[in-house]
Image (cartoon, rainbow, N blue to C red):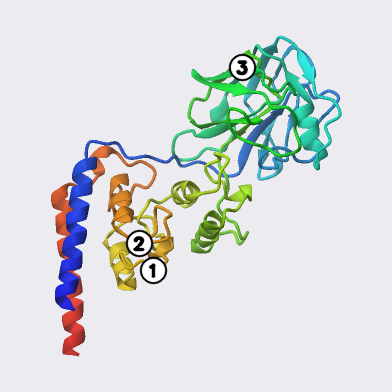
């Protein structure tokens, strides 16, 4: 048994060394800490069709209903702060070639119909500034996701959206049935990981803008007990594996519920990093020891986050370990910023593996002696 254990850990060390050597020159993905539950929502062309309660992809509750004029400005905007009104210092100006109207939309949520009825015709331009002040002061850089609601009711019309220099094409759909679909041929365009406190949106061709939402993050306390902990993580894990369409689980706001949301929850909601099994805020040897005590490494048994499945394939194997070390925050106490130089050197990984092998040998001997 002891020989099998030595062989297993030697294989782990060899695998880690190979993977780390291949990825030392790559910059790991980094997350951005943010305040959770804040959004800024603007409904254009809303003189006759304002939003009264909730609308949009995530059911945002506080909307700025802007008048049906081709250009304007608003110095007083309101933020959705966990569903409550909060005054925002952000400022807005816009101009458009005209105002369009989709009449007679019949959808389950009347406010969704109101939001998708009026729109800024293309070409148009929207400028927002002061976005760093929408949320209360917090550690970490500004990070938000922009959702552009676009529906003109003219199937096949093509246009482009340009957001702070990022251009994406769009094709209008024939009808709106109350379902929001992200993508170039859907009715929602999503621009993620925006960090500029000044936002400029320009449209070209046929690219209507019905409304926009700037979402600063989704909360991670799913059971509402006031804590972001392993219970919420396991609930999120279950949602991603069952194919849930409940958008409260779409933590990274990309229109999908999958393992990327688990990784976003770890980084944004919990403020830690891949590999932190016990969720104490750091990925270190204590996490690895806890993992290997469970004993399902490369066994094929079903695993969750706390038993080593970090890439979402439901098992704990070398690919999960490589993902954790590639992020580069092993024993760095830095979950939100993981510079390339913090990726463990091959020698460090070898020492780590050797130390774990030694620990298990000592545990084995102590059991035999007793």
Q: Is residue 65 above or below residue 251?
A: above
Is 157 on the left-hand or right-hand side of 221?
A: right
Residue 53 position within the rendered picture, expressed as x and y whole percent measured from the top left? 79, 40
Residue indicated by mark 1: 301
Expressed as whole percent of the image width and height from the top left, the position of residue 10 reads: 16, 63
Q: Which mark is residue 159?
A: 3
Q: Earlier in the sequence, mark 1 or mark 2?
A: 1
Q: Residue at x 33, y 69 (%)?
A: 296
Task: Give the residue at the far front of this rendering.
Answer: 156
Element class at badge 1: loop
Task: Say which of 130 and 70 sits in front.
Answer: 70
The Cα–Cα distance between marks 3 and 2, rounded to whole angstroms, is 45 Å
Is any atom of residue 356 visible in this view?
no
Labels 3 and 2: the sequence-earlier one: 3
List the residue tagged with mark 2.
316
Foreground of the two, 143 or 169 = 169
């Amino acid at each position: 048994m002891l020989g099998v254990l030595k062989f297993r850990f030697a294989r782990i060390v060899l695998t880690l060394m190979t993977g780390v050597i291949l990825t030392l020159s790559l910059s790991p993905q980094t997350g951005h800490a943010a305040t959770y539950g804040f959004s800024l929502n603007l409904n254009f062309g809303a003189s006759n069709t304002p939003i009264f309660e909730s609308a949009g992809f995530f059911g945002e509750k506080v909307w700025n209903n802007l008048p049906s004029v081709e250009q304007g400005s608003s110095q007083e905007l309101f933020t959705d702060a966990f569903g409550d009104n909060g005054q925002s210092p952000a400022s807005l100006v816009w101009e458009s070639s005209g105002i369009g109207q989709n009449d007679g939309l019949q959808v389950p949520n009347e406010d969704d119909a109101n939001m998708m009825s009026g729109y800024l015709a293309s070409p148009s331009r929207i400028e927002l500034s002061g976005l760093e002040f929408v949320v209360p002061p917090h550690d970490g850089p500004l990070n938000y996701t922009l959702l552009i609601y676009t529906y003109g009711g003219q199937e096949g019309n093509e246009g482009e959206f340009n957001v702070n220099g990022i251009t994406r094409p769009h094709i209008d759909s024939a009808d709106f049935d109350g379902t929001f679909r992200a993508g170039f041929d859907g009715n929602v365009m999503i621009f993620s990981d925006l960090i500029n406190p000044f936002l400029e949106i320009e449209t070209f061709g046929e690219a209507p803008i019905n409304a926009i939402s700037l979402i600063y993050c989704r909360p991670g306390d799913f059971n509402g007990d006031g804590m972001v902990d392993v219970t919420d993580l396991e609930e999120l894990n279950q949602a991603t594996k069952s194919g849930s369409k409940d958008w409260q689980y779409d933590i990274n706001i990309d229109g999908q519920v999958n393992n990327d949301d688990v990784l976003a929850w770890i980084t944004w909601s919990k403020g830690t990093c891949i590999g932190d099994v016990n969720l104490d805020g750091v990925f270190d040897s204590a996490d690895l020891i806890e993992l290997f005590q469970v004993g399902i490494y490369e066994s094929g048994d079903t695993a969750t986050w706390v038993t080593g499945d970090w890439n979402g394939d439901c098992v704990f194997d070398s690919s999960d370990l490589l993902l954790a070390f590639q992020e580069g925050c092993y024993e760095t106490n830095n979950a939100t910023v993981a510079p390339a130089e913090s990726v463990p050197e091959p020698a460090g990984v070898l020492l780590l593996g050797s130390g774990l092998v030694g620990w298990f040998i000592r545990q084995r001997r102590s059991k035999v002696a007793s």
